[in-house]
Image (cartoon, grey):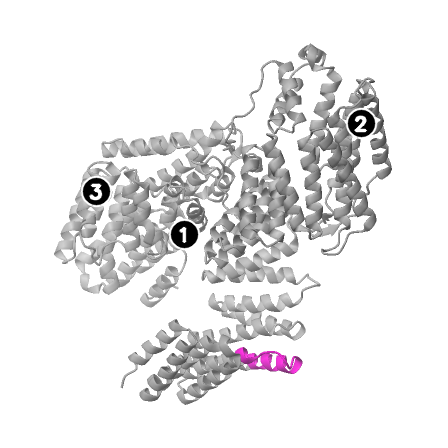
Amino acid sequence: MLNSIDAVMTALRENDDRPYGRQRTVTAEELVDAADQFDDTAVRAMALLELMEAYEYDGERSKAPVVFARVLKLWDADPESFGDWARQQVFWRFKWVATSLLGTPDVPLTAIRRWHEEMRGRYRAAGHGLQPYYAQRFHLAAHLGEDAQDAYELWAGRPRTELSDCHACEIRARAVHHLRRGDDATALDVWRPVLGGEATCAEEPYVSHAEALLPLLRQGRLDEARSSHLVGYRFARGKSGLARSVGLHIEFCALSGNEPRGLEILAENRDLFGVTGDPVSRLAFLTGVEVLIAGLARAGHGGLTVGGPPGASWTADTLLAHLRTEADALAARFDARNGTGTVSGRRRDRLARRPLLAEPLALGVRAAAAPELAAVPVVPAVPAREVEPEPEDFTALLLRARELQLVGHPDGDRLWTRIDERVTATAEGDLEALLGADAGPLGRLLAELAERRAHAALERGDWEQGAAELLAAGGLYRREGLVGPALAARTRALIAELVREDEEVDEAGEPVEVPAPAVDWAALDAALARAEELSDAAASGGEPGITDDDYLIVLQCRAYAAHQELVRALPEPPEQPPAERAARFAAAVTAYREAAAARGSVRRLAVARQYTADAAARQGRTVEAAEELRITIAELERAGQPWHTPRAYGLLGQALLQTGEQAEAVEVLHRALAAAGRWADDSYPFAATYLMVGHASAHVGDTGGAIRALSEAASRFDRKGPEAAEEAARTRLQLADLLTEADRTADAVAVLESVLADAATAGLGERLVAQARLDLARGLFSLDEDRDAAEEYLRLAAVLEGWTEDLHLRTMVAAEATVALVHADRWEAAHAARARALAAHEQWPQPGPVSAMLRQFARLTAQKEGPDGVESALARLAEADAVRERLEREEPGAETWYPRAAVHYERARVRAVAGEFEEALAEAERAITAYEAGGEQAETPRAEAVRLAALIEGTDLGRVEAARGRLAVAAERCRAHGLEEAAGILAELRERLTD
């Protein structure tokens, strides 16, 4: 019941602890009503100031002036009732009101200027500096687009005062000024302290991360742009007061080729369409959304379902019309108020922007929205070369496509696609008329198209369909009397299923082995015999029954089958494979290689060499493999067929990785990717190659390169569709690990959240999801997001209850969950979790995590409860000692110096809280002694124990000289061990300790 001033003040403090949002705002409104029942200026002012703050950060800025008018009325009538904080806030919030008036188009400019003068007069009368007043005049000039530079200089040249905006926010304002003048480089230089985390506040660097996204893109600083998006959006997500920032993140996605991610952000923030209390921020949000939606409409995706204002279904076209109508009208209202066209002009400038990158920027996060866009980027890659033209004449188109197919030129695929489209669009009875005299029979063309369908089916893993289409092609060729192509197609059908992986996933998403398909060597031998027969007939002067390329296709199928059979039978190197299979592989590849060389087919010879190199690498003969691949690449370049080099480069990169030549491997793999991109080879394994680049880059210490490569690998797996969801998720877990190691935990958390956001629908395996959840919980805890971390730990614990293996994880997770719950101030749940952890430890011991949990529990109990919590804290430390003693009994050789010393250290702290300083000093000295057993690795915690002992001895017991002597010796010891930072801390404390 809010029937007393104390009750209202308590409720105000509780509301202040709530996150900004609707609940806090509504409660603040109720508390103003509750405070009004008392004739007490202080409580009424506090309630009004709390309501202003709620409006400020909940997208309701336009309501602030009315509330502040009531505050000023109280101030003018009874200023003495305002405490120090409230007194300072009265003057501080003049700026909030100025911002609110400026951002509301219904407020005339004369009223805004009057308010500025009111602010100036009040500041002068109270003896405050006028820098904040000039800041507001600058913001007005910048908004109007008139005399902004002069106003900027009047503000920026003045010294800061106690009422100036925080340093980080002022840096943002200065940077945005340079942006509006078109100077990205200067803006980013000004922003450096904020974006680098040196200058921060409640909203910074997160708001600046949003504002800096496009400048970073335009300056080519793509790694920083990626990080700013990941970190900044996590903060802005769902916050009504940050609608502008959300709009900027959506715009960034549109202009960086990440339209699916933009649509996902839009769907997550649909409620922002209902936030109307901050018109200028709303306009920025609507315009950012329009940049995305207009781009989709231009690309032909107008019918795509998208997120829009709640209560209706929206397509890109219908939402675009809605956005244009509202945003244009809102911008016009600002211009009418301002008497300038600046607001509409800036909106037009944003809408005129087009994608800034040739290829999508890999962000590292998964976007589940609009999978049809993820599969085919709206911003297509542009090969850095001239592409093969498409002849208008159908016969010329067909003949050119066949020529390109013979040499394996990647542009042939595009020509065949065009051929298929024209055949599909032609009535069956008119197909003969399409073909010229040189094009051959219609049956041949239909067979060729069936082969194309077969290749597409095999690419997507539909082995049965692929084999069926090849057999159909063979039948069509045979009916036309084309026995060579018929034999080649039927032979390909024999090996179609050999591409199938040895591993599939069960209903739970876990991998299960499946029997490998057997090679039909009898059929392949018969195919070879028939190919030899046809080749001999042609050589003896008869009618040619098989071309060189069809003959080589039969030999390649045999070599491929022998290679697959060998690979499946290979043990770990350096053991030898089964002799029979090794001999069959050698014979098949040698025959293929010699025939290709004899017929002058560089393309087929390269494939034979790659089979040989791959088999050698898999058997540990990596030097031999690398040499074979270098010869292959050189031959292809000399033959003028560089489009075949990407796979050879890729295999060479793998071989170099095996030999430990990581740096050269990175260079070679980048060549593979560049060549595959240049020749638009869509069948190249981009995802797997980027994954290898990531691993190799991390190994050589190029963390930035590794993060870029793993981000791109995850994005490429996404494009492959649901069948690659597991690989994409595993790649993101590796990326998150790397980001965490690079001290970019917020980025890592954003990546992990995207993995878990649609884990169920993506069909990810339970263990992979569990690992992601554990990593996320730890990341959130590192970011001090303790409540969210605790929730993730509890979700993970529920999953582990059903496991029958790795049961020790139950103990570890329960222990870590306990610590998170304690830090989140959820003590009842923490006690329950501690009990679960100890119970689990009885069955599945994890002494390290459990002991650490108990020590943390003890420390935080003493911190929270003071002397009243000492008994409980000591009980936790006794439990920690029991954990160690059990370990010593069960594993006599186990190292236990650390948990022994750490418990003594924590007990010293607890005893000091209780005022038992002699006992506390004794415990600290026991900790110092126990750390001696740890050797070099224990020097840092030992130094901390000395610091604690000196504090107790010198400060609490008054034995200053003894403490100073202790510190001098310890500092010298630290220097001897190269611990300069620790030595400095001890020396500084020694100087502070005086009589």
Q: Residues within 10 Å of mark 1 (few under 14, many from 20)?
A: some
The boundaries of the magenta stretch are: 879-899
* Precedes in sequence: disc 2 or disc 3: 3
Please report the residue visible at 51 percent of the width from the left and 79 percent of the height from the top.
935
Magenta stretch containing residue 726, yes or no?
A: no
Q: Residues within 10 Å of mark 2 (few under 14, many from 20)?
A: many
Kindly identify which numbered label has been placed on residue 487: 2
Q: Is residue 473 above or below residue 716?
A: above
Residue receiving disc 1: 21
From the viewer's perspective, tell me whether residue 804 is left or right of residue 852: right
Q: Amino acid at mark 2?
A: Leu
User: In this view of the protein, which residue sits in the foreground, 186 or 118?
Assistant: 186
Quadrant holding the C terminus = bottom left
Please report the residue visible at 56 percent of the width from the left and 23 percent of the height from the top.
388
Q: Amino acid at mark 1?
A: Gly
The answer for how far apart the CA atoms under marks 1 and 2 are is 71 Å
Residue lying farthest to the left in this orientation: 125
Q: Residues within 10 Å of mark 3 (few under 14, many from 20)?
A: many
- Can you tell which quarter of the image residue 835 is in? bottom right
Magenta span main SS? helix
Residue 531 at x, y percent in the picture: 82, 28
* Precedes in sequence: disc 3 or disc 1: 1
From the viewer's perspective, tell me whether residue 856 is left or right of residue 802: left
From the viewer's perspective, tell me whether residue 240 is left or right of residue 721: left
Please report the residue visible at 48 percent of the width from the left and 43 percent of the height from the top.
265
Residue receiving disc 3: 112
Q: Amino acid at mark 3?
A: Ile
Q: Are marks 3 and 1 in contact (CB under 8 Å)?
A: no
Q: Comparing marks 1 and 2, which lies closer to the viewer?
A: 2
Please report the residue visible at 41 percent of the width from the left and 89 percent of the height from the top.
918
State the SS at label 1.
Answer: loop
